[in-house]
Image (spheres, rainbow, N blue to C red):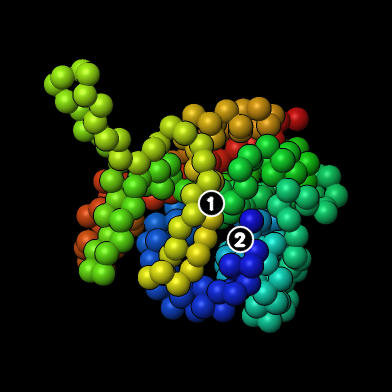
Amino acid sequence: MNQDFYNDYAREWTERLRDGKNIVHTYVEKPALLKKIGSVAGKKILCIGCGSGDECNELKNLGASEVVGVDLSPEFIKIAKESFPALEFHQMDMENLSFETNSFDIVVSSLTIHYVPSWQKTLGEIYKVLKPDGRAVISTNHPIRFGSEIKREKEREIFLLGYIRYKDPKLVGDVIGDYLNPRRIDDVWFRNKFPVSYYHKPISEMIKEIRESQFELIDFLEPQPESWVKEKDPSFYNIHSKIPLFIIFEIKKIN
């Protein structure tokens, strides 16, 4: 669950996020997530994997009546409480949410659910704490991007998903990356400073777990960078206007 990793790097992670250096969040995931959440006026919201609490504060400023944040990392919860003392934060496992049944109008999970191998328990907990007709908006790694084989060099990074096929059917070519097979991936982010482990699965498996959890799948999207990113970071825009980084699911609790 990466608790030790996030504890060790919580301060640096927070600094990168607040300085806009965590560009995948700033350019793609956060704008798309907020757009998909929609109006929060008068809503009670739970943020799973709240990190430093910035997202909770933004939702409160957008008109939510109450926002509660939970995270497994005690260091992140400490930072969140220091930064936003008027909000409510708890150290808590997303697979064991200690809230009353039917407590929240909206549950938001930002790039967190891929840290568990199976979504079933987490989705069951989200279903429990949502009010009838409540919605959850969940972002996660896109399996095309994160199923690719990664090679990091000093001046560049290479992400490949494909294969070599020979005209002679007896010759077996190399397959580069692996989209279809669920597995744990160990990686290092932020220029080899931040070790992290997450779980990969294809979109079909994600949808299967959502359907089996009693939720109604309302929508899902594969967000592209906002148009302004083209001027800010043309290389990033060129890549991720064609190849997705994340996928966002909107699901609804069925009465």
Percent coordinates x, y for residue 1 in the rendering: 64, 56
Residue furthest to the right in view is 100
The residue type indicated by label 2 comes to Asn
Q: Is residue 123 left or right of residue 192?
A: right
The residue type indicated by label 1 comes to Tyr
- Between residues 50 and 66, which one lies in front from this camera angle? 50
Residue furthest to the left in view is 167
Q: Which residue is mark 2?
A: 2
Which residue is rendered at x = 28% and y = 60% of the image? 157
In the displayed structure, 243 sits above or below 216; it is below
- Between residues 243 and 177, which one lies in front from this camera angle? 177
Percent coordinates x, y for residue 212 in the rendering: 66, 27
Determine the secondary structure under disc 1. strand
Percent coordinates x, y for residue 30 in the rendering: 47, 59
- Between residues 163 and 232, which one lies in front from this camera angle? 163
Q: Which residue is mark 1?
A: 198
The mark found on residue 189 in the picture is none
Q: Are marks 2 and 1 in contact (CB under 8 Å)?
A: yes
In the displayed structure, 240 sits above or below 155; it is above
**Dot 1, how many residues are within 10 Å of its Cα: few (below 14), some (14-19), or many (20+)?**
some
Percent coordinates x, y for residue 11 in the rendering: 56, 79
